[in-house]
Amino acid sequence: MTTLAKSTLTGTDPTETGPTESPETGAAATTAEPVLAVRDVRIRSQVDDREIVKGVSFELTPGKVVGIVGESGSGKTLTCRAVLGILPPHFEVSAGTIHVAGEDVATLEPRQLTAMRGSTISAVFQDPASYLNPSIQVGPQIAEVIRVKKGAKRREARRRAVELLAAVHLRDPELVYTQYTYELSGGMLQRVLIAAAIAADPRVLIADEATTALDVTVQAEILDLLADLRDNAGLALVVVSHDLAVVAQLCDEVLVMREGEVVEQGPTEQVLYHPRHDYTRLLISEHEQYGLEKFLTREQS
Amino acid sequence: MTVLEVTGLDVHYGLRRQRRQALAGASLAVERGEVVGLIGETGSGKSTLARAVLGLVRPSAGRIVIDGEDVSGYGERQWRSLRRRGVVQYVFQDPLRSLDPDLSIADSLVEPLLIQGVPRAAAEAKARTFLAKVRLDEELLPRLPGELSGGQRQRVAVARALVTEPKLVILDEPVSALDAANRVQVLEILKDLRAAGIALVFISHDLGSVAGIADRIAVLYQGELVEVGSARDIVVTPQHPYTRLLISSAPTLSTASAGRAEREALRALLTA
């Protein structure tokens, strides 16, 4: 249905450990070349000279999913923005390195960073409507990405945009192509944004609270869609959420952040069933006391 | 004792050709000291039901009885007097919008009492009592809402709802905007209120967030109450396909999320 590349990765070792084990040459521990390697990244606010993010490290190979859990202000979004090279004014990466597809982001010119975004690494955020122009049909906005990033001709870009709308499971892609943001629901808009984000065949997709504002049933559909993209296109994902349960659905590895620090990091199973930090235990006990887990027994896959 | 009794409630919005039914024949009773969770997605009618109980929208049919008083036919003046007595109170998701940003916490808390004609000294004493009930320190009294954390603000909003000693409190997504630690704290406070005999209606789009606190859960789907039952029954043995879809969609801490095929089947069933 689409020209999305089939998974190029079949042989990663599922038991591979986190990047903290190999700070120098992360690639040595894995069989596949990481598409994203974040090593001890620290982010400083220049206004009050405070360190806001105090050392984040993780590595992502194709088809893998890393989750970052934390409250607002924990530094999870700043970390993502540093990876995308779009830190807000007065914030800077003060230490550590970020490699996207082998390239050190710090050494790239703004022009090269712009070229990298969309075509190698892409992102979707919480409020899809604010990333689309309300006075232009949504389809041409996706087609524009394809023309700019892939150099496609108009007709080809349109055809491909409709394919993408179908790939994100929008029921009538030809109709959606011609619709405006106000005609679409929040879940449909998030699908449109995901279609735009994957339009230039990136290797990494960051989903920062991408399902937070959606109804629960729609959230489940979007999470299913992300899982499809991982399985069919070998997309590597960074899933950011304040809810540990959302991250648990999808991720191989979880980072729990609090006040800029990674308080716990490890394979999802380990973090969920053998948490070591009190804060992770708090997140879990909240679910067990007040969530569906109060009545349902937790199952391990 | 039944604090809220809603029978066969219909609500319509819009005029003539744009007339649209938001609520169809909703019936629900809430007892003293009971927490009823009202679950539904965007557009399901859950906020409409709350607004009808608060007298903010006029139902086109049905009966609403609050603490033994039939308010179905009430006009604007009667509703105002009912609100002034503070029998029904409400707490919304975003306390920054429900608290006056220019009023100190102390002024916000005494305002509903001053409106009732309570002398200022007595009102202030009462405000302090209720601030303690929501586990906040008195030193917050002179501050403005903007100077408090989100969790503290929401607890102030709860305290403000309590000062008139209501029989019924309606909470619309009260913990959705809070982080884990504050969420637990607010839920603990709601347990205290239940123990004190207040009836609570807890509205949320997320079944997971009310499952732990609600005694009973009512599920709204496209303006109709499709299922009402004990929290355990709703979560463990949901009957209606929509309730089943909600349960299988809610993310849990289980890594085994085998629900996808089931969700797709239920969705097909609901759209059929």
Image: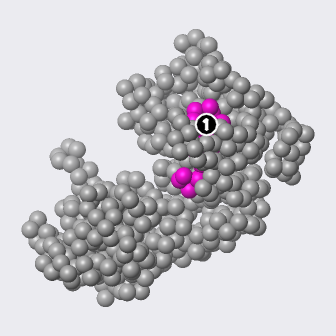
Residue range of the region highlighted in magenta in the rendering: A71-87
Name the amino acid type tagged 1.
Glu
What secondary structure is marked by label 1?
strand
Task: Judge whether residue B66 can be spotted in this image.
Answer: no
- Residue, far bottom: B1
Q: Which residue is tagged 1?
A: A92
- Dot 1: chain letter: A
The number of numbered discs placed on residues in the rendered structure image is 1
Percent of width and height locating residue A282: 62, 69
Work out whether residue A26 or residue B240 is closer to the camera in this orientation and state it: A26
Query: In the picture, residue A272 is in which quadrant?
Result: bottom right
Work out whether residue B100 or residue B208 is closer to the camera in this orientation and state it: B100
Work out whether residue B200 or residue A222 is closer to the camera in this orientation and state it: B200
Q: Quadrant of the C terminus of chain A?
A: bottom right
Residue at 36 percent across and 86 percent down: it is B197
- Residue, far front: A49
- Residue, far top: A153
Residue A81 is one of the magenta-drawn residues: yes
Q: Is residue A132 left or right of residue A197?
A: left
Percent of width and height locating residue A219: 54, 50
Residue at 49 percent across and 72 percent down: it is B185
**Rendered position, B159 above or below A213:** below
Residue A41 is one of the magenta-drawn residues: no
Q: Is residue A42 left or right of residue A86?
A: right
Residue at 73 percent across and 61 percent down: it is A271
Percent of width and height locating residue A155: 55, 13
Task: Judge whether residue B117 can be spotted in this image.
Answer: yes
Query: In the picture, residue A165 is in which quadrant?
Result: top right
Residue at 52 percent across and 74 percent down: it is B212
**Rendered position, B256 above or below B33:** above
CA neighbours of label 1 inside 10 A, class few (<14), some (14 to 19), many (20+): some
Query: In the picture, residue A225 is in which quadrant?
Result: top right
